[in-house]
Amino acid sequence: MRDATSFDEFYRSTSRRMLRYGYAVAGDHTEAQDLVQEAYARAWRQWGGLAAHPAPEAWLRLVVARLATDRWRRLHRWRAALSRTGPPEPVPPPNEDAVLLRGALRRLPAVQRQALALHYLFDMSVRDIAREAQVPAGTVKSWLSRGRARLATLLPGLPAEELEANDVA
Amino acid sequence: MSRELSELYRSLAEDADEHTLAVPDDLRRRVDRRARLRMAGAALGSALLVGGLATGTGLVLAEERGPLAPPAAVGPPATVPASPTVPAPPPATAAPGVPTGGSPRATGKPTVTAGSTAAPPRSVPDGAFFVQAAGNRTGVTPVFRDTQALPALCDARYRSDAGIVQRRTRILTYKLPRTPKGYVPDGSYANTVTLYRPGRADEFLRELRAAVRGCPAQPGVGGGNASTSRLRLLADDGFGDGSVLFEIRTPARDVDGNPTGGEEVRLVRAIRVDDAVTVLWEQGWEGTSSTRSQVDADSRRAVDAIADWLR
């Protein structure tokens, strides 16, 4: 038996964070809304067991990440095709931090976007990210380090000297 | 930690906060209704199978059938590839404990069953967007973008935006039927479908009409050079439950930015169908002007797509 009240409470207490995460990994508002709503839909279908799960929010993040990865693969092909022959990209407003970061994140591999989002949006340490992603800590350090280095090249003005991995352990 | 990167992420979070999700009550209802419909479909498939008529019917019902087993714990993720590759086909059923990717379908098409009253739609599905006629297709797959639905009209603001349930914009290219395949497109659209709360869609059309009237001219950019665009409403009738059509004329320039003496004409049409509005903003292709007959034909298709969705 699924308890709607506890699900609603979980939804309300986590949806804002989850939408931020979805936005950071998908790079698009509509995509993020779709991904996150689908993740919650799956959570509700399994709420009978998930409600007792020790970390339902982590489970939900994993769903969002995987949905984003799958969707990203399809969109990547569309965007590649469009960039060859399609209309020019709409010019983003200048000096808009969110727009700049979103554009740069689109050029990062999915695992790096996810690791960076967990670190900067959820304040998670390398060890926590590694536990959630079920990978060695060294792998997460590599994701973060490479992701930040790549962002430094994509975002002029981001000081390269601060893009070291030694402050994320 | 990189302070600057933190600030960028903070901006990103604030940007995300501008958008909201459906209330949990709506989400639960939609999920449960979808499950009921699937179960009903599965039951029908079984009946047909018994009758010897349902060869293969169950296949389309396999995905996400019925409630899934609860996860025992956060499952170890499969190795996520470092770069996008060809996606694996979604499994027929989800393994317990491991959330699967598969095809997100958060925006399912509302379905009306006999004898029941469907709840009003809460999201804009892919099916709300029109399918191009075969002769107009360029081979470039339309793509959804988080971008402007309308050109700027001086400093117009739309109070009806407060009544938006969801808005999605798709970018697509087209060719005119007489253009041979393999040529560059003849034009492109930003095609937006917006779902409003009851009564607000009509308000949007009124505001748009007023915005165009109030902005007969505005600075524009043609070929990288400052110029003035002139805007005016055009008579429009016969599309959906009401429509607004306007044009934007900008002096045309050659590749060097010199005036050619001609004009570049953009057509924009917004059409209301019930509580939804579809906007076709024709954006041309390398200086082409909008072709009224093509925009009219695509507008009719856009209306049909909305009507099919809301039916």
Image (cartoon, coloured by chain):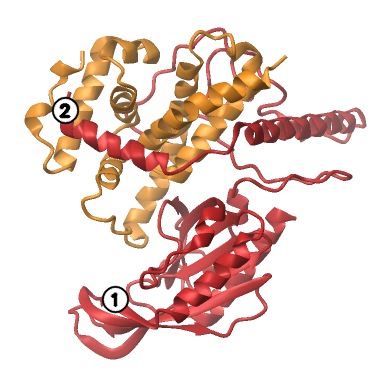
Chain colours: A orange, B red
In-front residue for pair B196/A69 = B196
Residue picked out by circle 1 = B220
**Is tag 1's residue or tag 2's residue first in the polypeptide sequence?**
2
Could you tell me which secondary element the residue under label 1 belongs to? strand
Above or below — where is A34 with respect to B126? Answer: above
**Corner quadrant of residue A68:** top left
Between residue A47 and residue A82, name the one nearer to us: A47
Where B88 falls versus A86 (above or below)? Answer: above
B208 relative position to A125: left or right = right
Mark 1 neighbour density, 10 Å: few (under 14) some (14–19) many (20 or more): some
- Give the image location of residue A10, x and y in percent: 55, 21
Q: Are marks 1 and 2 in contact (CB under 8 Å)?
A: no
Q: Residue at x 31, y 24 (%)?
A: A115
On the image, the x and y values in percent for residue B222 come to: 26, 77
Say which mark, if any, is on residue B2: 2
Is residue B85 at all visible to an observer of this figure? no
Across and down, in percent, residue A133 comes to: 38, 15
Q: Quadrant of residue B94?
A: top right
The three-letter code of the residue at mark 2 reads Ser
